[in-house]
Image: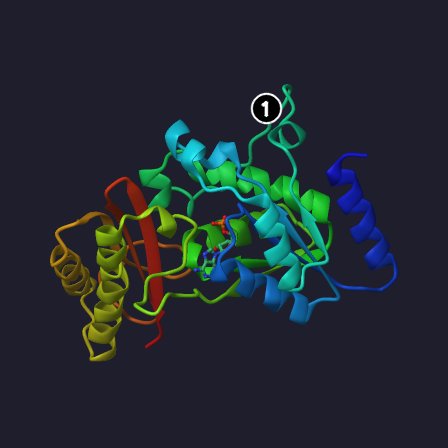
């Protein structure tokens, strides 16, 4: 049996016995953010399955894929310690046969921001998550707000393709200086690691301006851009104030907003976001 078949059989058996299933898809190199999702899933559900798969389809550059950190043994231990009952780490060959040509494309929300900067990225994400959902079956699936646009893409896909999945959004886990935990952080050199906290400061300044009454999205974007510009090591990609449901750029902040940033520090590209409710 392939690992997919084993997982499907075990989760079917669990559901058959009346146990609820939680599912946490990851690319491994597990950190506090991933572990918070696994803990939440195992608190909410009777059985928690975690997948670890570095999905080649969602990487634009062969270099980034090659350099993506991998440590399966320590990931397995960390996932079990956090409450997972099943850890599933399929090979690329198992996930994508030679004959594989099907791709899932989520329109609209995939096109902006990360989608514009990384063409094809969300097609790769949606395709692999659809495959993984078909392995997991009916479940609650836990995703981090750290990848806010990805969360919206998955929610859209689940609604449009009628997956028997409840998507649960989980808050972003941060380091002490505000930097969002990411598998890419350990690849930052010391100077870039310390510079990278500017992303959170920029978002927090944007939120503070809105909370203080600023309603012009352009002014908020400017405040965030100026904050990022104080850190010479940061090369910004985008700074956005968007509708939290569609990620359309806002001109006036009339109700809730999502603030999103992306920047490079040397070779490493980081993203982050915060929501604001008015
Ligand atoms: P990845 O392994 O980067 O594909 O991430 C797997 C899941 O963990 C996704 O749902 C991410 O949004 C989530 N995640 C990654 N970093 C964090 C974080 N700092 N806080 C919360 N969730 C996170």
Q: Quadrant of residue 80?
A: bottom right
Residue at x-position 24% and y-position 47%: 265
Residue at x-position 34% and y-position 60%: 273
In the displayed structure image, the side of residue 180 where residue 212 appears, left or right = left
In the displayed structure image, the side of residue 183 where residue 94 appears, left or right = right
What colour-coding does the image apply?
rainbow
Residue at x-position 66% and y-position 50%: 163
Residue assigned mark 1: 101
Which one is nearer the viewer's eye here, 6 or 246?
6
Query: What crowding class fits label 1: few (fewer than 14 Cα within 10 Å), some (14-19), or many (20 or more)?
Result: few
* Rendered-image quadrant of the C terminus: bottom left
Residue at x-position 33% and y-position 52%: 271
Residue 95, position in %: x, y? 64, 32
In the displayed structure image, the side of residue 101 where residue 255 appears, left or right = left
Q: Residue furthest top?
A: 99
Say if 63 sits above or below 184 in the image: above
Which one is nearer the viewer's eye here, 43 or 256?
43
Q: Secondary structure at mark 1?
A: loop
Residue 110, position in %: x, y? 42, 44
What is the total number of numbered labels drawn onto the structure image?
A: 1
Which one is nearer the viewer's eye here, 253 or 184?
184
In the displayed structure image, the side of residue 61 where residue 128 appears, left or right = right
* Rendered-image quadrant of the N terminus: top right
Residue 260, position in %: x, y? 31, 57
């Amino acid at each position: 049996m392939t690992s997919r078949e084993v997982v499907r059989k075990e989760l079917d058996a669990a559901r058959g016995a009346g146990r609820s299933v939680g599912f946490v898809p990851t690319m491994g190199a597990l950190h506090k953010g991933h572990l918070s999702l696994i803990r939440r899933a195992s608190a909410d559900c009777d059985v928690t399955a975690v997948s670890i798969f570095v999905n080649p389809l969602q990487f634009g550059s062969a270099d980034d894929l090659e350099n993506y950190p991998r440590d399966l043994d320590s990931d397995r231990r960390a996932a079990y310690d956090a409450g997972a009952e099943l850890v599933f780490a399929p090979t690329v060959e198992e996930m994508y046969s030679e004959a594989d040509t099907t791709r899932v494309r989520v329109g609209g929300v995939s096109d902006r921001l990360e989608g514009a900067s990384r063409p094809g990225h969300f097609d790769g994400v949606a395709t692999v998550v659809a495959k993984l959902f078909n392995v997991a079956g009916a479940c609650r699936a836990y995703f981090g707000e750290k990848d806010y646009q990805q969360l919206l893409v998955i929610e859209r896909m689940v609604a449009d393709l009628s997956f028997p999945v409840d998507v649960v959004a989980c808050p972003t886990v941060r380091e002490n200086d505000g930097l969002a935990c990411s598998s890419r952080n350990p690849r930052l050199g010391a100077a870039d690691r310390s510079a990278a906290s500017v992303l959170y400061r920029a978002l927090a300044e944007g939120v503070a301006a809105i909370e203080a009454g600023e309603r012009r999205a352009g002014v908020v974007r400017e405040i965030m851009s100026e904050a990022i510009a104080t850190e010479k090591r940061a090369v910004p990609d985008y700074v956005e104030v968007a509708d939290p449901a569609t990620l359309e750029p806002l001109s006036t902040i009339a109700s809730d907003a999502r603030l999103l940033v992306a920047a490079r520090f040397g070779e490493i590209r980081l993203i982050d976001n915060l929501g604001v409710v008015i």
